[in-house]
Each structure stands twice: as C-alpha cells, then as structure tokens.
C-alpha cells in the first residue's frame, strides 16, 4: 500500500501527521484501465465531521471505501491511530470494521429477516458480546434515535426514514471512533433527510465519534465542520484553499 514519493511511506506504526485520528496520502485506485482515484489525501481529527463532496463518478465513494478498510488502495498509505492499514492483514482490517469503524450506507443495508433490534445489536454480537448485553445496548441506541417502537419489527416492515435511523443506531452502537456514511440521506425526502442528519450529528457529538460523510448535497455538507471535494479522483480540502492531495 506504500508508494514512493507520497510523503514518507510509514512503517507499521507512526504518529499521524498533525495528530490526526486518520490520515492518508498519495492514494490511488485502479479498476482495470479505469483510474478511480489518483494522488488523493485526507485527514480527520477526533470528533470532527468532514463532508466529502463530488459529482457522481468522481471517486468519492472509492476514497471512503479505502479509508474504511473495505478496499485496499493500489498506491499510497493510510494511518489510523498511528497504525498503517497497509501493514494489516485482512482479518485485522475486518476487526477494525467491527469495532473502530462504523458504516452507514444510502440503502441502510439492514438484514430484512432480522428485527430492528437484532440488526442494531449485530456489530456487538459479531464482536462476541452476549446477546442480553448486546440487545440492551441496542435498545438504548434505538430509543435515543426515536425508533424504540421498531425494535420487534422486521427491517423490511418499517418506513424508509425509520430504517435509516435504525441503520444509524447499528452504525453507532459499538461507539466507533469513526463513522463512514455514504450518501446516508440519498433515498430520503427532505424532512427525513434533515431528521437523520440532525440525529447523526447530535449522536456523533455526544459520543465523540468522527464522521466522514460522502454526499453531493450541499444541505448535507452544511452539517460538517469542513468539506473535501473530489474531482477526477483527486482531493481538495476547502479548509485550506489550493491544497491538493
């Protein structure tokens, strides 16, 4: 994952630049002859919310998937809490996705055969938490997001707005250090969009969770502390005009 000429390639562990919770430099990703991302950079601090904006096909989802350890970049490096993701095994990255990283997708990704309570408790159960404890914590999270009444309903039986709040509960139940949200309001009407973003922002602030939210909606990006734009697979941080990844 390390690439020559992209700052100094890190060893297995190293202090992230500027004390960032997660930092990446020189990221590139190719799908056959197609360049999805080229020389992208990214930083996020603990508790910060960063909006990643760009047109469809610009590379923003590829960037998010690399930062979250779902995809491995073809070049460049990513440090999380001083650890080099490129030096980790797939099982180690999978462990991070269950514990330190939370994910919220446009379609929610709930398991339709499970109840909303079981869906919410799933990350805890995968980490070995006992059912009673996991479901108690899941119930508290559902209640905090105003969807406690969905607990015993199957995921396929609730409305779109409710389902996305249940998905947010699941993403936050393990109190991740970073929540990666990919177009989290893309299938919601404007009223539910506002509700979900306000709940996401409030919940993340209370738990100190950093949030990376991919969006093309200015209304959604307005909730963030700063914006990073992606164009043709390259990043530009609007907090520091002229800076490019």
Image (cartoon, helix red, strand yellow):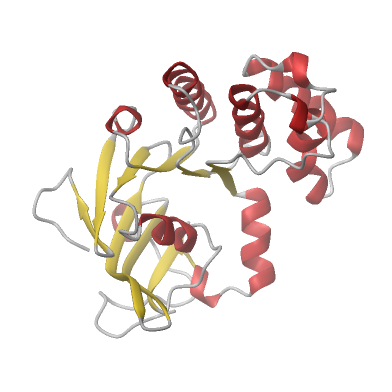
Measured along the vertical axis of the image, is residue 74 above or below residue 228? Answer: below
Q: Quadrant of the N terminus?
A: bottom left
Q: Give percent across and percent down for residue 146.
A: 64, 14
> At x 37% / y 44%, what residue is drawn?
45
In the picture as drawn, the residue positioned furthest to the left comes out as 242
- 174 to the left or right of 152: left
Quadrant for the C terminus, please. bottom left
Among the 4 quarters of the image, the one containing residue 102: top right
Residue placed most toward the observer, 166 or 80: 166
Horizontal arrangement in the rendering, residue 223 relative to residue 209 (left or right): left
Q: Residue drawn at (8%, 54%), measured in percent from left and top?
A: 242
- Horizontal and vertical percent for residue 88? 58, 73
Residue 30 or 88: which is nearer the viewer? 30
Task: Return the x and y of residue 220 as percentages of the image width and height.
Answer: 35, 30
Picture residue at 46% right of the left edge, 63% below the top: 66
- State the image coordinates of residue 108 (x, y, percent, origin top left): 61, 39
Picture quarter containing residue 28?
bottom left
Which residue occupies 32% across, 57% down? 42
Residue 120 lies, with reference to residue 4, above or below; the image says: above
Q: How many marks?
A: 0
């Amino acid at each position: 994952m390390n690439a020559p000429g992209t700052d100094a390639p890190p060893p297995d562990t190293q202090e992230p630049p500027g004390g960032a919770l997660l930092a990446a430099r020189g990221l590139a990703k190719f799908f056959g002859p197609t360049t999805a991302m080229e020389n992208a950079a990214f930083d996020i601090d603990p508790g910060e919310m960063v909006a990643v904006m760009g047109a469809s096909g610009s590379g923003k989802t590829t960037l998010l998937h690399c930062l979250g350890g779902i995809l491995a970049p073809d070049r460049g490096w990513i440090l999380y809490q001083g650890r080099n993701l490129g030096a980790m095994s797939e099982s180690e990255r999978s462990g991070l996705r269950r514990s330190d990283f939370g994910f919220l997708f446009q379609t929610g990704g709930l398991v339709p055969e499970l109840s909303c309570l079981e869906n919410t408790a799933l990350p805890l159960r995968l980490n070995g938490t006992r059912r009673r404890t996991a479901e108690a914590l899941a119930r508290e999270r559902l209640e905090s997001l105003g969807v406690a009444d969905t607990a015993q309903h199957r995921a396929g039986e609730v409305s779109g707005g409710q389902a996305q709040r249940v998905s947010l509960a699941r993403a936050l139940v393990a109190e991740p250090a970073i929540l990666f949200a990919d177009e989290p309001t893309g299938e919601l009407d404007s009223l539910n969009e506002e509700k979900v973003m306000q709940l996401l922002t409030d919940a993340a602030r209370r738990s100190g969770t950093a949030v990376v939210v991919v969006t093309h909606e200015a209304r959604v990006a307005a909730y963030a502390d700063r914006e990073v734009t992606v164009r043709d697979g390259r990043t530009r941080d609007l907090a520091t005009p002229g800076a490019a990844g």
